[in-house]
Amino acid sequence: MRSDKETQNPSTTSPKRRQILQAAEDLFLAQGYGAVSMEAIARRADVSKATLYAYFTGKDALFSCIVADKGRENLLDESLFPEEEIDLRATLLTIGLRLMRFLQRSRTLALQRVVIAERARFPELGRIVYRNGPARFVARMAPWVALLGQRGLLRPCAPEVATQHFLALVRGDLFLRGALGMTPAPTEAEIAASVEAAVDAWLRAYQAPESGTAAS
């Protein structure tokens, strides 16, 4: 799969690019991936097809950028993974809440449903979401987990596996319910309680006993 030039350069944030991405996202959520053409996206964005193709090589590149941009905006903030001395549990709670609030956004869940609905005809959508969502998060958090291990805050572990476990625990049942369109949506209190339980379970598995911050 070819990626467009702006997937390779995340710093590109031109108004025209944002206009195209918003139009594409709106159409994908309203009509599904398969029913939307590049011509329809150009019309919705009020740009020529030549301009559209100058930015993106095709629908897969557009969808990939939509998913990648959301992940960068919401989950890859450098401040989420501090290298200085920290309250480990409090920091993990902050990361977990940021992650779960992002996953519970209506448009995040709607994109997930598009992938589920279109997976048989367009299996590349699943790869796009995994590569730009969970895999990107693991790639960012795993080195931080390795650093925590080096500082003696965590037991010896495989950082990528430990991060995958953290992600799975935080997503838990709430994300599955949301992706399946079950109602009602969780309250902020339910999200907080779910994340707290996930963080404490992860700490029981991975925190070094001598680190001095026991999970409740």
Image (cartoon, rainbow, N blue to C red):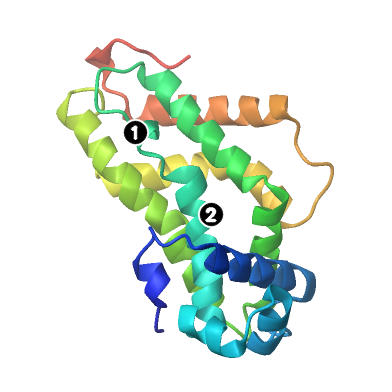
Label 1: element kind? loop
**Residue 124 visible in rendering:** no
Foreground disc of the pair 2, 1? 2
Q: In this view, does 75 lie above or below 125?
A: above
Classify 10 Å Cα crowding around label 1: few (below 14), some (14-19), many (20 and above): some
* Residue 183 circle label: none
The span from disc 2 to disc 1 (Cα, nearest Å) is 18 Å
Q: Residue at x 41, y 45 (%)?
A: 76
Q: Where is residue 99 in the image (x, y as percent from the top left)?
A: 53, 40
Kind of residue at disc 2: Lys
Q: Quadrant of residue 188?
A: top right
Q: Residue at x 62, y 30 (%)?
A: 194
Q: In this view, does 15 lie above or below 33?
A: above
Q: Which residue is drawn at 78% across and 76% down?
A: 31
* Residue 70 circle label: 2
50 left or right of 112 in image: left
Kind of residue at disc 1: Phe
Query: How many numbered marks appear?
Result: 2
On the rendered image, what quadrant is the N terminus found in? bottom left
Q: Is residue 200 above or below residue 18?
A: above
Query: Is there CB contact under 8 Å for labels 2 and 1?
Result: no
Residue at image mark 1? 81
Q: Earlier in the sequence, mark 2 or mark 1?
A: 2
